[in-house]
Image (spheres, rainbow, N blue to C red):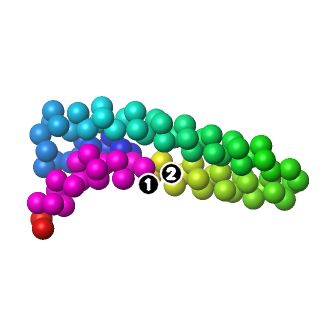
Amino acid sequence: MFAALCLASGWTPWPRRLQAVLIGAPIMVISEIAALSLAMIALIGAGDPVKQAEAGRLTDGLIRVTGLAVAAAVWFVVLGRTRIGSRA
């Protein structure tokens, strides 16, 4: 998702787009590892079956939303501010 956002940012030249991907990729990897760690902690901490089901739903949502939200946030910081700032 993040790489697609960077590569589709047509207002910036190709070298800047590729640089943005190289800057943001490690941030994305670190955020995914952090999300997976929190998900594992939630799953391990759930004891009874009801809490395990709730923890499963929590981890599913956490993993899905974190990747998209972090991708959008990192893209905005790396490339998006220049586009939005130029319209103001």
Compared to residue 84, the image places residue 29 above or below, namely above
Measuring from the top left, give residue 22's x and y in whole percent. Answer: 30, 31
Q: Is residue 25 above or below residue 87?
A: above
| Magenta stretch encompasses residue 2 | no
Q: Considering depth in this image, is 32 or 64 the residue closer to the camera?
A: 32
Is residue 78 in the magenta section? yes
Residue 86: percent from left, percent from top: 11, 60
Q: Is residue 62 left or right of residue 23?
A: right
The residue identified by callout 2 is: 66
Query: Dominant secondary structure of the magenta stretch?
Result: helix
Three-letter code, disc 1: Ala
Quadrant housing residue 87: bottom left
Q: Are marks 1 and 2 in contact (CB under 8 Å)?
A: yes
Please state if 7 lies on the left or on the right of 70 as rendered. left
Determine the residue positioned at 74% across, 46% down: 43
Marks counted in the figure total 2
Q: Nearer the viewer, residue 51 or 9?
A: 51
Instruction: State the SS at label 2.
Output: helix
**Given the image, on which type of amino acid does mark 2 rest?**
Thr
On the image, the x and y values in percent for residue 72 come to 36, 53
Can you identify the residue that label 1 sits on?
69
The residue carrying pointer 1 sits among few (fewer than 14), some (14 to 19) or many (20 or more) residues within 10 Å by Cα, namely few
Residue at 87% x, 54% y: name it: 49
Residue at the (77%, 43%) spot, across then down:
44
Q: Where, quadrant-wise, is the C terminus in this rendering?
A: bottom left
In the picture, measured across the screen, residue 20 lies left or right of residue 82, that is right
Q: Which residues are magenta?
A: 69-86
| SS state under label 1 | helix
Q: Position of residue 38 (x, y in %)?
A: 63, 45
Query: Alpha carbon of mark 1 to alpha carbon of mark 2: how far?
Result: 5 Å
